[in-house]
Amino acid sequence: MNKIIILDRDGVINEDSNAYIKTVDEWIPIPGSIDAIARLSKAGYIVTVATNQSGIARGYYDVATLEAMHERLRALVEEQGGKLGKIVYCPHGPDDGCTCRKPLPGLIDQIVTEYGDVAGAPLIGDSLRDLEAGIARHCLPVLVRTGKGNKTLEKGLPDSLGTVSIYDSLADFTDHLLKEKA
């Protein structure tokens, strides 16, 4: 089995905004997140990203802008000596009836197509819908407190998720994972 880690983007890697991240300048990494991705990569993990980006359907930004944000993410990770795997995104709005918008597992399925089975892989998100998408493909749900993570915890996690690991941030998760593997 590949050593795969699946990350949500907004609220896990970069600061989130209720007004959407619409430009490269608004795309601001959460402290420690880029280094965490690089450390995971250097430790042999394939780090992938699965992100809902309904701002495209809503007309807040276009695909070229989204790709520029992702190019910046890749460049920052590479500057730290790491490598980022596939980034998949859902450009649809909540009422478009697609199969890729989380909590549906379509984005996870795209990662499976690229890398193979993801059962047992950590899926790290800050919202219930992130965790539900991962659970549908037998990923291990990991909630971070950054982004909407604390609000998600306050609402309570359903029993259907099983055991959810909770960390302060992606950097905190990475510290624990790499310490366990050392």
Image (spheres, grey):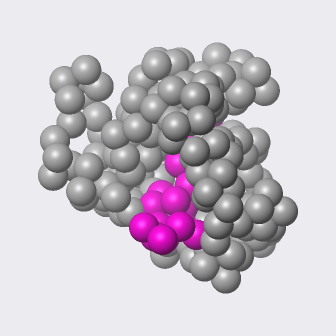
Q: Is residue 117 above or below residue 82?
A: above
Q: Residue furthest bottom?
A: 25
Residue 9 lies in magenta, yes or no? yes
Q: Residue at x 56, y 55 (%)?
A: 9
Report the side of 69 relative to 64 (left or right). left
Report the side of 155 relative to 125 (left or right). left
Return the x and y of residue 169 as percentages of the image width and height.
Answer: 39, 60
Return the x and y of residue 143 as percentages of the image width and height.
Answer: 35, 46
Q: Residue furthest right?
A: 64
Q: How many marks?
A: 0
Q: Is residue 140 above or below residue 130?
A: above
Residue 151 lies in magenta, yes or no? no
**Chief secondary structure of the magenta span?**
loop
Q: Residue at x 53, y 48 (%)?
A: 8
- In the rendered image, which quarter contains the N terminus? top right
Image quadrant assignment for residue 116: top right
Return the x and y of residue 25 as percentages of the image width and height.
Answer: 67, 82
Report the side of 108 relative to 182 (left or right). right
Q: Nearer the viewer, residue 33 or 14?
A: 14
Q: Nearer the viewer, residue 78 or 28?
A: 28
Would residue 79 be seen by someone viewing this image from the given angle? Answer: yes
Would residue 3 be seen by someone viewing this image from the given angle? Answer: no
Q: Residue at x 77, y 62 (%)?
A: 62
Q: Which residues are magenta?
A: 3-21
Q: Nearer the viewer, residue 14 or 39?
A: 14
Q: Is residue 135 above or below residue 173?
A: above
Q: Residue at x 52, y 37 (%)?
A: 95
Return the x and y of residue 115 as percentages of the image width and height.
Answer: 74, 25
